[in-house]
Amino acid sequence: MKKSWVIFLCLLMSLTLVLSACGGGGDAAEPTKEPAQEQQGNEPEKKGGEEASGDSGFVNEGIVKASDPGKSPATATSRTDTLIIGMQAPAGIFHPLYAETTYDNYVMNTLFKAMLEVQKDGTYAPVLAEKYEVSPDNLTHTYKLKEGLKFSDGSPLTAEDVAFTITVLHDKAYDGPSDIIRNAKIKGGKEYFDGKANSIEGIKIIDPLTIEFTTIEPSALAQSAIGATPIISKAYYGKDYKQGNLSYMNDLFTKPLGNGPYKLEKFQAGQDVSFVANENYFKGAPKIPKLIYKFTNEETNAQLLQTGETDMDFISANLDNFELLQSMGFLDVSLFPTNGYGYIAFNHNRAKFQDVKVRQALAIGLNREEIVEAVYQGYADVINIPQSKLSWSYTDEVNKYEFDLEKAKQLLEEAGWKVGADGVREKDGEKFKINFAATSPNVVNDAIIPVAQANYKELGIEFVAEQMDFNAVVEKRKKGDFDMLFMAWALTPDPQGAQNVFITGGSQNEIGYSNKKVDELFEKGGKTLDVEERKAIYKELYQEINEDMPYIFMYQRRDMWGNNARFTGLDMTPYRNFSYGVDSLLIN
């Protein structure tokens, strides 16, 4: 297998670092927002779902079928009623209104369904809904549920449960990642949030299967904010509900009652989540009786696939890993653009990061190309805005922030950070030191840390990394206990979905970023429904974000999954991950 010398050199450099290391691993990814990659490679592109030949070396996109399925280890083939999928450990928040990380959402999507669900092309289509209609003025959204829907305990799922689900999101005590008031603008929602009303005027139950939502103005996100929110049981999740008090919900995070294809059997923190088929699922129980999500990381995922202890896992996309998976013979390898991006966040509550010249200097002074090539070997591209090239809203008319140490030094000088006698910059008596919270094990951080240490030392900045598991980094971010950190966002199909990440006080803006123009452009984009008009709005928005630098935008990569050819039925795209379709999987 070809050796990645750039990674090797990065790891050698990292020996000079003083790190505090804990366990963990994986690509530091989150849900709800995500872009994709520029298409690269020496071959013609293979569009979503098409088979790609692995004989010519570099495969950029498509599905490379197993060369010899008969090589599947006995450990795997002996599991005739069970499928094991590897993934990074979730935080244990298996609740559709509170789940935030990608990994909690994998579990949540296995347990719950919504009225609408994202499709392969990024559009939404009815699932629990029989039909969905919007009035000509785009203010009234009407959903009619399928007949005979049930929760996994056999109790009926009705419009009452839909109304309860959306009402909870309006409660002042709700502290999850969604912002239904801003996204859907349901009439009376703000009054309910403020405690001035004990019901939401714009939610009307027509009959047990029909519900109507009236909004105060058109909203680009109303469809997904209402229709794509998984439905929870009012009888189970609402039996202790009182307006203004949702503290009891935390006790139900690992005790979910869903309506999806599987039921939770057992959650073993740090080990796995096991499921059994839901006999009350509206499509009928899945053909595979038992499903397990086994927790893996960058150091174990490929090995567990090879030994047959897992049947499928996400593997960082680079040439070395592609060749490794292909060499096993019994794996199908899927490659497709990621609807997401990696970034390094600044803590904008720290004074040193409140100067845009400092943020720009740290972007220009970091060799992003070296980092991205070291990790992905042609399977990712450096980016400069928080959007995917798959999106109709994407623009490339922005500052590229190419690596330039001298320009970075100039910006730091202009910002008042002067080099001291010890070679470290200082301002107002403060030394320029960056405490970097890093997920470990993580191949991206393994490349970022030594490159950032070397580059920033040239700038007169001390860069100190503290390594810990993914969920610990998430907690540090929530508490604001960091200077900088690396993470990744998963994007929704509509660009407006990122508003809560960047607007002042947004429900997912945990870095303290604030920009009045960004707020105004997101507000404008959310109210506008014409795509051509929206393109112009988002172009201006991305140009403003690019100049103001809330993050150092790192890359858009490709996703690579290896799956044992002993099972079929996978149908993944940049918009739709495997967890939406576990009910279609079959063991051969």
Image (tube, helix red, strand yellow):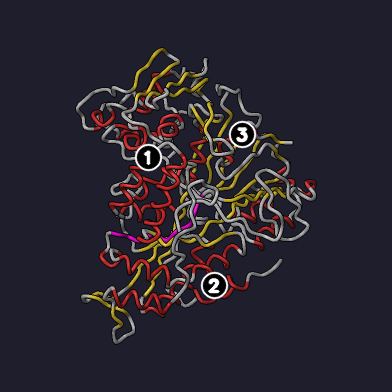
* Mark sitting earlier along the chain (1/2): 2
Magenta span covers which residues?
Answer: 340-348
Secondary element under disc 2, as helix, strand or loop, is helix
Residue type indicated by callout 1 = Gly
Residue sitting at x 54%, y 72%: 11
Badges 3 and 2: C-beta atoms under 8 Å apart? no
Q: Amino acid at mark 3?
A: Lys
Which quadrant of the figure contains the C terminus? top right
The answer to whether residue 458 is left or right of residue 337 is: left
Q: CA distance from mark 3 to mark 2?
A: 40 Å
Residue 19: x and y in percent read 43, 70
* Mark 1, residue position: 526
**Up/down of 545 relative to 584, above or below:** below
Q: Residues within 10 Å of mark 1 (few under 14, many from 20)?
A: many
Which residue is at the front of the view, 507 or 18? 507
- Which of discs 3 and 1 lies nearer the camera? The answer is 1
Q: Amino acid at mark 2?
A: Leu
Residue at numbered disc 3:
290
